[in-house]
Amino acid sequence: MSSCLVSSLHPFFKEKDIIYDPVMVGTWIDGDSCIWTIEPNTFKEIIWGENKTDSIHHVTYTESFPGEEKMDSTYNIVYYEDEHAKAELIGTLFQLNGVSYVDFVPDPDVDHTSSDFTSWHHVPVHTLARVQCNKDSILLYWYGDEWLNELFEQNRIRIKHETVESLDYDRHVLTASTDELQKFIRKYANDPKTSDEIEQIFARGYTDGQEEYGVFLKLKPYSGPLPKKTAIQVEPNYVN
């Protein structure tokens, strides 16, 4: 679905907009039987002690204490399409004008390609989803490229972007700054037509195939095993 989502080179959020909701944490399954694991992203904060001098060797050193795990208010998200394919992302939950969104971007610390040379040709992009977190479900609605295309065709918006042409699909990649992106979100992502459609889908909990401008997913709690890569049986090569 990545080819049909609104994508941006810059994040849709600022630090002041970030929120954290523990309800998102867990293992979930969507309507296509794809499994999602969502965990809080953590970092180690090392506390340094006072300088001390070794009386025998006259060496001055700084005594350090064990690192302390702290959350940075983002989420590590692993999406298992099947036992052969998974995606690792960083999700950032944030609010604008009281509406909750998730900014998704590929995890920069994970090798997303099989070749270093291939990876040099890839630029990670951010996608934007409106989100509603419940105790028994997570509802996600990604803003789609068709929605963005319609705004361009109707000359309703002017926002910095590049059009990337391919044989199968032409997509717009937003190149605007985060400030400009947030002005765009406030004005157009919550216009009555778009907002009403999303709220009706969230209220129903399903789409009936009626989503016109984006991609909807409902994640439900999952307690089964995670997919494991199936071992490939290799036939021995006998040489006479």
Image: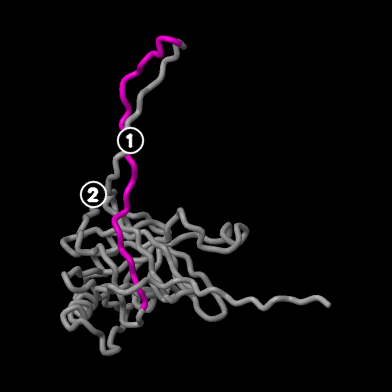
The amino acid marked with disc number 2 is Lys
State the extent of the magenta-drawn residues as a range.
34-56
Q: Nearer the viewer, residue 109 or 179?
A: 109
Q: Is residue 117 left or right of residue 74?
A: right
The amino acid marked with disc number 1 is Pro
Prevalent SS, magenta region: strand
Q: Position of residue 156 (x, y in %)?
A: 32, 72
Residue density around tag 2, few if under 14, some if 14–19, many if 20 or more, within 10 Å: few
Q: Nearer the viewer, residue 79 or 217?
A: 79
Q: Position of residue 26 (x, y in %)?
A: 26, 65
Do the CB atoms of the residues marked 1 and 2 lie less than 8 Å apart? Answer: no
State whether residue 139 is above or below residue 18: below
Residue 113: quadrant of the picture: bottom right
Report the residue marked by disc 2: 16
State whether residue 28 is above or below residue 204: above
Residue 198: quadrant of the picture: bottom left
Residue 193: quadrant of the picture: bottom left
Q: Position of residue 92 (x, y in %)?
A: 30, 58
Name the residue located 67 percent from the left edge and 78 percent from the top edge: 235
Secondary structure found at label 1: loop
Q: CA distance from mark 1 to mark 2?
A: 29 Å
Based on the picture, tell me whether residue 146 belongs to the magenta stretch.
no
State the mark number for residue 66. Answer: 1
Name the residue located 33 percent from the left edge and 66 percent from the top edge: 37
Name the residue located 32 percent from the left edge and 57 percent from the top edge: 180
The N terminus sits in image quarter: bottom left
